[in-house]
Amino acid sequence: MLAYFPEVMPDELLYSALARLRRHRGIGASSQFMEELFGRSHAVASFDLPGGIGALVERLGSACGLDAGAIIRRTTLFPFYTAFVSAEARETTWRAMVESTVGVHLRLGLAASRIPVVRALRYCPECLSSMVASGGERYWRRAHQLPGITICPDHGIALHRSSLVAGQTRRHGFVAADDADLVVVGSGIPVIASPDAARLQALAVAAARLLETPPEPAEPANVSEGYRARLARVGLATGAKVHQAELEQAFRGYWGAALHHVPGILSRAALQGDWLASLVRPRPRAMHPIYHLLLRLFLDELAEVQPPFGPGPWECLNPLAPHFGDFVVTDLRVRRDRSHLYGDFECGCGYVYTRRRDVDGTVGPARYRSYGPSFAPALRAAIARGEGLRAVARRLKLDPKTVMREAAIAGIPTPWRLAPSGAVTRGNPVRVRCRSESTIQASHHGSCARDWSFIDRLIARAVGAEAAAVHSLLPPVRVTFSELERRMTSQSWIRDRSAKLPRTIARIDSVVESTNAFRERRLGFALSEAEGATNVTASCILRSAGLPTTWMPRVRAAMAARSTVQVEEAA
């Protein structure tokens, strides 16, 4: 065990502390020093995520005053690289650093990142002067070696690169800052004008803060969900749908020219890769911490907009619930249909209703969507009491045809003869009451024979509305036989009864969308999503719309036509 270890300075790298130890003891041979520290003469002198911490602590003993955990947290870049990963990934990285770091960069998603790693150790001239004045010697700071950061967080000046390149200069030895060639090889960035310098310094401060106080570990999906919630509060998302084109435009507007000084972010003035969109997707992959910081700093500066349907909670409109009229609804899903927003309000009792918000901000009346579990018991009790259909409808605050439809969906026989509205949209199979008790005929299974002609007309009438609903979905969904069948009944229910449902089959076949028609809609959607974005090429639109390469001439023609219309409208 070692009898002496230098005091670890504020924000000092483990690499730097070991280099100063070697300098203070006057050890010349790197192999001898590595053998003494790690038990291996050819151990690699890494400065970002070093391995072999367990063996090092055993040999340092009490001279260092730090255990393995303190060394990893306080003298390496571990807190920065694992700031936005799950607890499992953080624990795996921790164990790898205690033992061997083979493959750790790959597991953290850093190997595939476009943010370049720091090769040459960097320094701030102002910081070096302060170090000499306070402690008499210079050292390497952690905050100066963070990838993507080119500004000193304390002084706001460009970091300088030393001639000490990791993996090339003394790969198996440590070099102290006082022994390194600190001639200015070149600053990481040119002179930066305000406000870009202020933006970059804010990024550097945020990155340095991760070293001291990293956030609690979280699953990437939960982090992404948090981003989408914040985007919804600032008007850049509707429900779970993020307005990607608007997000990128606002993001670029906030960071401005500062993005040119963050390595690996831009390529020919466009964002390099799809990292911004990936960060806010429901299933994000492991992303570099710099991406998270860029998005978070941008979101921190945006003012929250008024929710489209006002702040929650919202009123429950279930007349069967004891909390009817109380503001207890907290679940709101917002969807967009052309120029209108629709909010689906779902209470904990299962009741769902919808409101529409027009472009002028007007919020329309509530429209019933679903009752939930309270409907069936209430209807059965009313039928048992011999109540009339209209009296039941008034109590349920529904029109009589809707009551009949919900009864058919729930499979509840009714004594009323009114035809239901719409069609059966959930449950399997369709169960409709026969016209009168005298027409009921028992089958060999002892169940009621179904009036298939009536069921056929009932479902056929609903095909047009369901096709229009599918056609209005964004991103576009193709109107297919299977999609309509799932929405109105269940998978294969109509096909299996095609001989009994000829009107339904013919009606569905008449509204099914062709492949080319669907591709045209995909193309139109991709063009609308790209509005306002810069440097959008025909290839980008082709990929975004999921079209084959044979559609490239059609894409170019559509882009040219849209550009002409925009010019004429501007004129």
Image (spheres, rainbow, N blue to C red):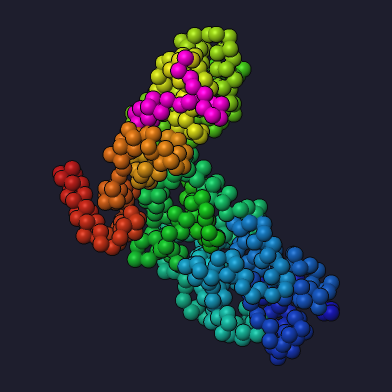
Determine if the magenta segment contains residue 455. yes
Q: Residue at x 58, y 9 (%)?
A: 385
Q: Between 253 and 132, which is closer to the camera in this rendering?
A: 253
Q: How far across and how far down the image is residue 543, in percent?
A: 34, 59
Residue projecting furthest to the front: 444
Above or below, comparing residue 183 to residue 29 in the picture: above
Q: Residue at x 56, y 22 (%)?
A: 376
In the picture, which quadrant includes the N terminus? bottom right
Q: Residue at x 28, y 48 (%)?
A: 514
Q: How far across and how far down the image is residue 122, in percent?
A: 55, 73
Q: Between 114 and 283, which is closer to the camera in this rendering?
A: 283
In the picture, which quadrant includes the C terminus? top left
Q: Between 29 and 217, which is closer to the camera in this rendering?
A: 217
Q: How far across and how far down the image is residue 199, in percent?
A: 47, 56
Left or right for 479, reference 106: left
**Whether residue 372 is visible:** no
Count of numbered circles on the image: 0
Above or below, comparing residue 15 to residue 541 in the picture: below
Q: Quadrant of residue 469?
A: top left
Q: Quadrant of residue 26?
A: bottom right
Above or below, comparing residue 33 to residue 549 in the picture: below
Q: Which residues are magenta?
A: 438-461
Determine if the magenta segment contains residue 102. no
Left or right for 188, reference 32: left
Left or right for 372, reference 192: right
Residue projecting furthest to the bottom: 29
Q: Quadrant of residue 100?
A: bottom right
Q: Residue at x 41, y 32 (%)?
A: 342
**Whether residue 426 is visible:** yes
Above or below, comparing residue 257 to residue 416 in the picture: below
Q: How far across and how far down the image is residue 369, in percent?
A: 46, 27
